[in-house]
């Protein structure tokens, strides 16, 4: 269960920033404001900061785990629980990453359907995405990192939309603050979890980082950027929408872009929705890469076979089960079950291997 | 290359999947009007430009009836050679009657739900029949009536006395408790179309209007603006008219939220320049300018107080004072606001500042 990765497949530590940040930013950013406003309203910023804090703690836990047992989550599970139970937990992670990728893809296809092309069947979009994902995956982890890096680089200009929206803002919407109970704020923290997850991919790609210890600060940097970015978007949404309107709007970030009117394009949201694909592609690619990589390590097979299998599963889901219900079920699996699993399992894992190390059983 | 081939192949096949929407192969509506017929059905009208060489501003109006606003579109498409699409709609007109019968929340539901329509769509209330307005030939024959109307409203909002409106701003106000919002009114006067005031909404219905004379004060109260024309009489023997063009305005609110005696002071600040003075005295005289400023402040305070007293009497809150109050006081509920607002002590303090007098003395 040990693994050695050839130096030539590894990436520089600072790319971890882009990997974490691009993986965290995805579908959640388009719609998290609605649920957050419902539970926490003007105090949502506290929930976001709290969620950011938890993410930082989790990243610290992950790095701590790997400083005791070098390798990836499959190695750690094996050392902590033995072959049978360890493999079971590893399989759970593989499933989780697969569902994560599937959820991102279906959510995005749903957006394309609602906003642009309602008549194109879902499977055709997913076919294009899957071929692209497979193509990127054949390039190996370095190519994937490159895609994540590029996607962050070429999408940041979209931020101008939020400054544009400020023209129609009402700043009193930010007040009153401290109007909600601790329970409300905790509920809000749960509601932002979908925008905050993504850092856990570290569990799989950690061995692919050159000088992995040095990369911790970049991982924290990526998570911090996501937190601040989420906070910024939430504040802009609060002042742009009135509270009732925000709760009613399914994709507040997208609806906000439809206020933009440029001299050469009247309806900017169409650019925004299509450009968002560049943000979504690394999300799907990294999740599927992680899932197939996990399967490869578990069953000792070539990575392309699980990738084919997973692509087929995703395609089948898109052909037979594509509707709002299945999307809701998938989102349910990720949040709360996936999120709670991560939140409980990783600290537990750290404690277990810490004890084992103390007893010199590692 | 072998790996790339299937990608290119599927891309080529998939591009045939989507319905193409070429500009001259669809009916692209630029304005929509909704009227209420006597048998309680909705008549919808779509202004659709016709693209032909050398024929600028040619357009047709398609209309149909149904019982819901979105279904009108289907009814109209039945009669047209091409489907009607809404992507370029800039303005939606509602008659007073339809708002009274159906209510604004129900009417705007479809507009907000439909992703084809942007948030910037203008909403306008029509005094009289929408049909008469939409069938008016615009004085500028290069544009169609839809573009004409949307330009008219936009121009008024940017440089005239009309308060900023669009679908997004309207919904933001009208979805709050009480649903206090406002929209411009258009009226046909003779052969001309003109903005004739602002309609004030409360709980889904039009409850009051601000007439054109008060629109400057109303605009100053609801937003900070950059342009606006204000005419008032100087308080001397001759009662001469002075016209001031505002350059900048701002409002600030001072709230005392005591349980027994809540009160509020609204401070208006206007910086402007003198556009016209119906007076023979020269204006470079500092004393004269001071006098104009003072009289303008007094007049503004009087007008604004009158408007607000009227709002309080009707228990409507188009200015959004409730939100200002809630921002200060967390325990504020809508029920309490409703009972408190009509008797609340609201003071206006206006501050006028004349920056320049134009190029002549």
Image: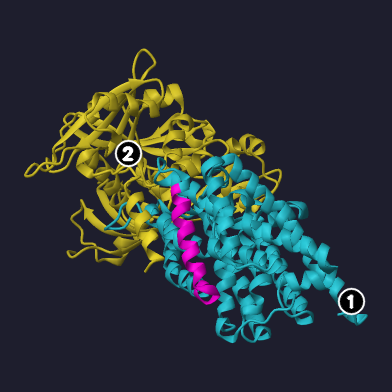
Chain colours: A cyan, B yellow
Quarter occupied by the N terminus of chain A: bottom right
Q: Secondary structure at mark 2?
A: loop
Q: Nearer the viewer, mark 1 or mark 2?
A: 1
Nearer to us in this view, B95 or A105: A105
Is label 1 on the same chain as label 2?
no
Q: Is residue B286 visible?
A: yes
Quarter occupied by the C terminus of chain A: bottom right
Residue A258 is left or right of residue A346, and the answer is: left
Nearer to us in this view, B279 or A204: A204
Residue drawn at 39 percent across, 24 percent down: B98
**Most distant residue in the front direction:** A301
Nearer to us in this view, A292 or B1: B1
**Most distant residue in the right direction:** A359
Q: Which residue is mark 2?
A: B86
3D distance between C-alphas at marks 1 and 2? 66 Å
User: Which range is magenta?
Assistant: A124-144
Q: Chain of mark 1?
A: A
Q: Is residue A143 magenta?
A: yes
Q: Chain of mark 2?
A: B
Q: Is residue A176 visible?
A: no
Please identify the quarter of the rendering in which residue B360 is found: bottom left
Label for residue A356? Answer: 1
Residue A260 is left or right of residue A48, and the answer is: left
Residue drawn at 54 percent across, 63 percent down: A283
């Amino acid at each position: 269960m040990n693994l050695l990765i050839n130096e030539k497949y590894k990436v520089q530590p600072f790319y971890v920033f882009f990997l974490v940040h691009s993986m965290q930013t995805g579908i959640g950013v388009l719609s998290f404001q609605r649920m957050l406003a419902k539970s926490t309203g003007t105090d949502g910023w506290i929930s976001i900061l709290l969620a950011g804090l938890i993410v930082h703690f989790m990243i610290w836990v992950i790095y701590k785990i790997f400083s005791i047992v070098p390798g990836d989550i499959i190695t750690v599970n094996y050392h902590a629980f033995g072959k049978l139970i360890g493999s079971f937990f590893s399989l759970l992670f593989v499933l989780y990453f697969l569902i994560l990728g599937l959820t991102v893809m279906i959510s995005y296809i749903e957006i394309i359907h609602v906003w642009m092309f309602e008549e194109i069947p879902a499977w055709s979009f997913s076919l294009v995405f899957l071929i692209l994902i497979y193509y990127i995956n054949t390039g190996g982890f370095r190519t994937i990192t490159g895609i994540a890096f590029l996607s962050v680089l070429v999408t940041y200009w979209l931020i101008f939309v939020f400054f544009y929206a400020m023209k129609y803002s009402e700043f009193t919407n930010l007040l009153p603050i401290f109007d909600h109970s601790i329970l409300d704020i905790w509920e809000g923290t749960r509601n932002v979890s979908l925008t905050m997850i993504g850092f856990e991919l570290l569990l799989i790609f950690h061995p692919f980082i050159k000088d992995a210890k040095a990369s911790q600060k970049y991982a924290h940097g990526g998570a911090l950027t996501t937190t601040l970015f989420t906070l910024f978007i939430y504040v802009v949404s609060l002042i742009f929408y009135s509270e009732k309107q925000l709760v009613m709007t399914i994709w507040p970030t997208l609806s906000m872009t439809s206020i933009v009117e440029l001299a050469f394009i009247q309806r900017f949201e169409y650019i925004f929705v299509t450009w968002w694909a560049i943000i979504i592609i690394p999300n799907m690619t990294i999740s599927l890469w992680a899932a197939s990589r996990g399967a490869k390590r578990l069953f000792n097979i070539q990575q392309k076979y699980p990738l084919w299998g997973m692509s087929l599963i995703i395609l089948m889901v898109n052909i037979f089960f594509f509707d709002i219900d299945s999307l809701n079920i998938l989102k349910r699996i990720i949040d709360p079950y996936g999120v709670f699993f991560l939140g409980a399992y990783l600290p537990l894992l750290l404690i277990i291997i810490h004890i084992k190390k103390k007893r010199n059983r590692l | 290359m072998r790996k790339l081939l299937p990608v290119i192949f599927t891309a080529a096949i998939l591009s045939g999947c989507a319905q193409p929407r070429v500009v001259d192969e669809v009916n692209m509506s630029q304005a929509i009007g909704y009227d209420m017929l006597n048998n309680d059905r909705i008549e919808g009208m779509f202004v659709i430009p016709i693209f032909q060489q050398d024929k600028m501003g040619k357009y047709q109006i398609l209309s149909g009836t149904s019982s819901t606003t979105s279904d009108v579109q289907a009814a109209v498409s039945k009669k047209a050679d091409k489907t009607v699409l809404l992507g370029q709609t800039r303005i939606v007109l509602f008659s007073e009657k339809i708002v009274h019968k159906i209510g604004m929340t129900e009417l705007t539901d479809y507009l907000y739900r439909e992703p084809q329509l942007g948030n910037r769509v203008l909403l306008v209330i029509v005094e009289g029949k929408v049909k008469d307005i939409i069938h008016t030939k615009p004085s500028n024959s290069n544009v169609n009536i839809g573009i004409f109307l949307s330009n008219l409203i936009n121009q008024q909002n940017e440089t005239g006395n009309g308060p900023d409106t669009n679908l997004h701003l309207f919904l933001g106000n009208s979805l709050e408790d009480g649903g206090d919002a406002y929209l411009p009114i258009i009226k046909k006067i003779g052969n001309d179309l003109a903005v004739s005031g602002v309609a004030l909404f409360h709980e889904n219905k039009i409850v009051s209007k601000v007439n054109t004379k008060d629109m400057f004060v109303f605009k100053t109260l609801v937003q900070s603006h950059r342009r606006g024309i204000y005419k008032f009489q100087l308080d001397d023997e001759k009662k001469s008219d002075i016209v001031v063009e505002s350059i900048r305005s701002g409002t600030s609110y001072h709230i005392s939220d005591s349980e027994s005696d809540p009160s509020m002071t609204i401070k208006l600040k206007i910086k402007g320049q003198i556009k016209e003075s119906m007076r023979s005295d020269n204006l470079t005289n500092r004393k004269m300018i001071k006098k104009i400023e003072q009289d303008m402040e007094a007049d503004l305070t009087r007008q604004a107080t009158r408007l607000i007293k009227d709002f309080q009497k009707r228990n409507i809150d188009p200015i959004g004072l409730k939100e200002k109050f809630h921002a200060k006081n967390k325990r504020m509920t809508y029920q309490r606001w409703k009972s408190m607002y009509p008797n609340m002590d609201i003071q206006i303090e206006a501050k006028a500042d004349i920056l320049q007098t134009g190029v002549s003395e």
